[in-house]
Amino acid sequence: MTVQAGIGMTSMRTRMRMIERLQKEGIQDPQVLAAMEAVPRHVFLEDAFQIRAYDETPLPIGHGQTISSPYTVARTCELACAGRPLERVLEIGGGCGYQAAVLARLAPKVVSLERIAGLVGKARATLRALRINNVLIKNADGTLGYPAGAPYDAIVVAAAMPFIPEPLKAQLKPGGRLVAPVGLGASQRLILVVARSTGYVERDMEAVKFVPLLPGVG
Ligand code: SAH
C-alpha cells in the first residue's frame, strides 16, 4: 500500500468527481463533503482495487469484508452527525478504517470497533500513515458498543443488525443520534435513532445493503 497523492484514477480530480456525484445523489452536509474530499479513499484499498476507489461501489478489503460505498459512508455520516458540533463518536464495524478517517474530521474523538484482528492491524497502519491520531480502534465485538467511551454524540453501525440493542442506544448522549442497518438479507433498512428526553425516536430512512454483524472476535 502506498500513501501518496496519486495520479490518474486516484487523483484529486477523481475525488472531486465523487464529491460532485454525492451532491447530485442528495448529500448536503458541507462538513461531510469536505471530510470525504480530504480523505484519500484509495489509500485504504489494496493496489488492485485502488483504480475503482472513487466509484459508487463497495469493494473487497479482505477477510470476506467490504469497504462501504461512498454514498453509504456519506449518508450514514450525515444522518448521525446532522451538522452538530461533536465530541465523541462510536463506529461499529471499522473494516479498513475509511469511515473512521472521515469521522475523525468531524469529531475530535472517534472509537471504532472491529471484530477481525487482521483488519484492525491494517486499519491502524493506514490511519497512522495518514497521521490521523484521534481514532481509537479496538479489536472487539461491537454488538453492545463500548461503554468505557460513552456517552457518544453519534453512533454509526456499519454492519446489519437484526434489531438495535438497548445497551447501544443507552450509550447516546441526550440528543445523540445512532444510525444502523437493521434487518437480514435483502430487506435491510437504514434506521435513525434519536435520543430525546421523552425516549428514543426511530425513523426508517431508506433501503440499504450491508454485510451482517457477526458475534465474537476473529
Ligand atoms: N466502515 C467500514 C465498513 C466495513 S464493513 C469501512 O469504512 O471500511 C463492516 C465491518 O463490520 C466488517 O469489517 C466486519 O468485520 C465488521 N463487523 C461485523 N460484525 C461485527 C461486530 N460484532 N463487532 C465489530 N465489527 C463487526
Image: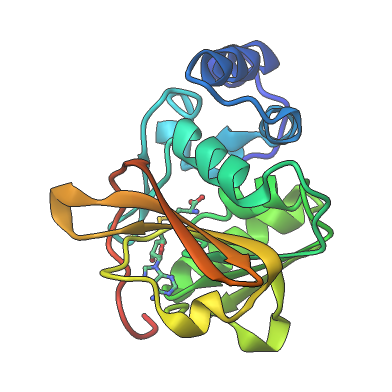
Which quarter of the figure has residue 128? bottom right
Which residue is depicted at the point 74% across and 53% down? 104
| Point 61% across, 40% down: residue | 78
Q: Is residue 26 above or below residue 117?
A: above
Residue 19 location, x and y as percent?
Answer: 61, 19
Count of labels shown?
A: 0
The quadrant in which the C terminus is found is bottom left
- Residue nearest the viewer, comparing 77 with 52: 77
Q: Residue furthest left?
A: 186
Q: Is residue 59 above or below residue 20?
A: below
Q: Is residue 18 left or right of residue 144?
A: right
Between residue 208 and residue 15, name the one nearer to us.
208
- Which quadrant of the render holds ligand 1? bottom left
From this viewpoint, which residue is outermost toward the front?
198
Residue 37 versus residue 135 in the image, above or below? above
Residue 1 is at least partly visible in this image: no
Left or right, 39 with respect to 177, comes to right
Q: Where, quadrant-wise, is the N terminus in this rendering? A: top right
Q: Is residue 196 above or below residue 17?
A: below
Would you identify the image quadrant in which residue 79 lies? top right
Q: Nearer the viewer, residue 19 or 122?
A: 19
What's the colour scheme?
rainbow
- The percent coordinates of residue 82 (x first, y second) are 67, 44
Residue 40 visible, this angle: yes
Query: Is 90 on the left-hand or right-hand side of 104?
Result: left
Residue 112 at x, y percent in the picture: 60, 68
Q: Where's residue 113, x and y in %?
A: 54, 72
